[in-house]
Image (tube, grey):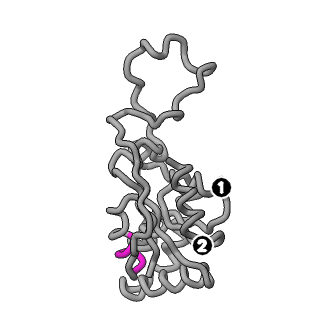
């Protein structure tokens, strides 16, 4: 899946372009290098400024302290603005950071509308990458323990225990969509 995404990005974008995506995709693209990356959660922190919600430890509280501080700093920059001016400033900041480069969204198609509301403008889908459909709890091939690190008799132990709370894993990300899209910001 990630190899197909990378191939499609290398064909349809240029190195140095800006990619807006969710964390599982950004982790991969950061490893590959070549694009400027924006975590979509930062845009949410901007669109819904301070006070930034600090939930109790547990479900959905996976934003680390340094990242939370960074999200709060970013939100503070836009806190005094009304929604329309905030959207204009966000758009101008992204365009200034992109320079003469293009800006793309990568993720599930339903996320395009969210990003459009957060930063304005519109996105046009330029590529679709089909994903294998996963059953609940199933992981993509190659994402389990390597054989030598697998617990003894792992195949006979029944379903895996529930995941600990933490950053959304790849299996959570792809379980709600049949394809990834690459969309260009217009």
Q: Position of residue 99 (x, y in %)?
A: 62, 83
In the image, 89: left or right of 159? Answer: right
- Residue 29, by quadrant, is bottom right
In the image, 1: left or right of 172? Answer: right
Magenta segment main secondary structure: helix
Q: Position of residue 164 (x, y in %)?
A: 45, 35
Against 27, residue 185 (above or below) is: below
- Element assignment for label 1: helix
Residue at 53%, 33% in the rendered image: 142
Residue at 37%, 75% in the rendered image: 116
Q: Position of residue 27 (x, y in %)?
A: 58, 53
Q: Dot 2 corresponds to which residue? A: 17
Q: Quadrant of the C terminus?
A: bottom left
Q: How far, Cα to Cα, is label 2 from label 1?
A: 14 Å
Q: Which residues are magenta?
A: 115-120
Magenta span contains residue 37? no
- Residue 86, by quadrant, is bottom left
- Element assignment for label 2: loop
Q: Nearer the viewer, residue 48 or 168?
A: 168
Point out the tag, 2 or 1, that comes first from the N-terminus.
2
Callout 2 crowding tier (Cα within 10 Å): few <14, some 14–19, many ≥20 = some
Disc sitting over residue 183 in the figure: none
Q: Nearer the viewer, residue 59 or 169?
A: 169
Against 12, residue 129 (above or below) is: above
Q: Nearer the viewer, residue 4 or 164?
A: 4
How many marks do you count on the picture?
2
Q: Dot 1 corresponds to which residue? A: 32
């Amino acid at each position: 899946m990630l190899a197909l995404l990378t191939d499609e990005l290398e064909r349809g974008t240029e190195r140095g372009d800006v990619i807006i995506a969710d964390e599982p995709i950004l982790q991969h693209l950061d490893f590959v290098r070549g694009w400027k990356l924006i975590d979509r959660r930062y845009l949410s922190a901007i669109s819904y400024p301070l006070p930034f919600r600090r939930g109790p430890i547990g479900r959905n509280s996976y934003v680390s302290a340094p990242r939370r501080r960074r999200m709060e700093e970013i939100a503070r920059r836009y806190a005094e603005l009304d929604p329309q001016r905030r959207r204009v400033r966000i758009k101008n900041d992204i365009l200034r950071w992109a320079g003469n480069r293009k800006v793309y969204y990568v993720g599930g198609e339903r996320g395009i509308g969210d990003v459009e509301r957060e930063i304005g403008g519109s996105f046009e889908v330029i590529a679709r990458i089909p994903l294998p459909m996963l059953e609940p709890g199933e992981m993509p091939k190659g994402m389990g323990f390597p054989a030598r690190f697998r617990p003894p008799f792992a195949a006979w132990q029944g379903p895996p225990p529930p995941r600990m709370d933490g950053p959304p894993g790849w299996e959570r990300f792809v379980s709600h969509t049949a394809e990834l899209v690459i969309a260009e910001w217009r």
